[in-house]
Amino acid sequence: MFINKPQELTHYVLEQMAKTEDPRTREIMVGLVKHLHAFVSDVALTEAEFHQACGLIAKLGQQSSASHNEVTLMAGSLGVSALVCLSNNGEGGKRATTANLMGPFWRQDSPLTASGESIVRSTTPGETLYVNAWVRDLQGQPVSHAMVDVWHSSSKGFYENQDASQAEMNLRGRFETDSEGHIAFQTIKPAGYPIPINGLVGEVLSQLGRHNMRPAHLHFLIFKEGFKTQFSQVYSSDDPYLETDVQFGVTQALIGQYVWHEGETEPNGVEGSNWWSLDFVFEVEPGVAYLPKPPISAKVEA
């Protein structure tokens, strides 16, 4: 076929995509071509801009490594990660959900930790925090024997894989829910932090005039056969960046209420201390349990 006009080109490419045997792959590729071609036409993309865009896409891959994922960071900064999450949970966005972003810092094989124990594995400054979390199904019944990964950044805003001074797997742990669907652990109160801006994401945020701050949060991954694997983030209600999260991740259902205890006995028996507590309930829905490929697999070297 000889192509002479833009409309003819789009029609011909769609014809070729329609020959794809797998129905889901065909649906995705047809939709992708429609939207990409419409985007090029809508913004009247120039040849120079197209070449620049190709270079930027290549740069995302070049700036990703075993300890950093610039692609995931960009997807979050454009709101794509949040859109995928909200569209695939809570009955397609019809109701609130405790599902949230996976983020670029989940690591597989966190240490199996007994409920109630600490996930602080090296000297880490910060205010003590005790967390109680419950996993329930859509009927409000406890989900027992679910594996729950927990991870978060230090009070300086670094995950352990970003910071060679932290012990391996510091501020990470893996727990199993009891008959009440409950886990508990001790850690430090997380702090908000800036996402890395030494790569392409930083360049884009600068051009858009946006800040690079994330509100303080704890990460959770809930896994059990028969239920859809849930990634989640619980945000701190007192964080100034709740409404302007650079990754667009904050939803009302995920704002946690931290409680300050002054001069009280800690759950571990230490008397007269000052500490924080957080109670939170997760709701998981039926579905396929799976573990995706971790965005990172290694720790930065000193």
Image: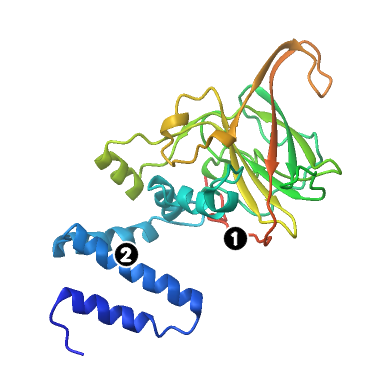
Q: Secondary structure at mark 1?
A: loop
Q: Is label 1 or label 2 in front?
A: 2
Q: Secondary structure at mark 2?
A: helix
Question: Residue 265: which quarter of the image?
Answer: top right
Q: Which residue is mark 2?
A: 35
Q: Which residue is mark 1?
A: 292
> Gap in Å between the C-alphas at discs 1 and 2?
27 Å
Q: Are marks 1 and 2 in contact (CB under 8 Å)?
A: no
Amino acid type assigned to the residue bearing label 1 in the image: Pro
* Residue that appears at 19% across and 63% down: 41
Amino acid type assigned to the residue bearing label 2 in the image: His
Rate crowding at label 2 as few (under 14), some (14 to 19) or many (20 or more) other CA atoms within 10 Å. Answer: few
Question: Residue 277: which quarter of the image?
Answer: top right
The label shown at residue 224 is none
As drawn, 209 above or below 259: below
In the rendered image, the quadrant that contains the N terminus is: bottom left
* Residue that appears at 27% across and 40% down: 208
- In this rendered view, identify the residue nearer to me: 126 or 24: 24
As drawn, 64 above or below 190: below
Q: Position of residue 194 (x, y in %)?
A: 43, 35
Residue farthest to the bottom?
1
Q: Is residue 243 visible from the viewing direction of this image?
A: yes
Task: Tell me which colouring the rendered structure shows.
Answer: rainbow
Q: Is residue 104 visible from the viewing direction of this image?
A: no
* Residue that appears at 54% across and 34% down: 252
Nearer-N-terminus badge (1/2) = 2
Residue 190 falls left or right of residue 183: left
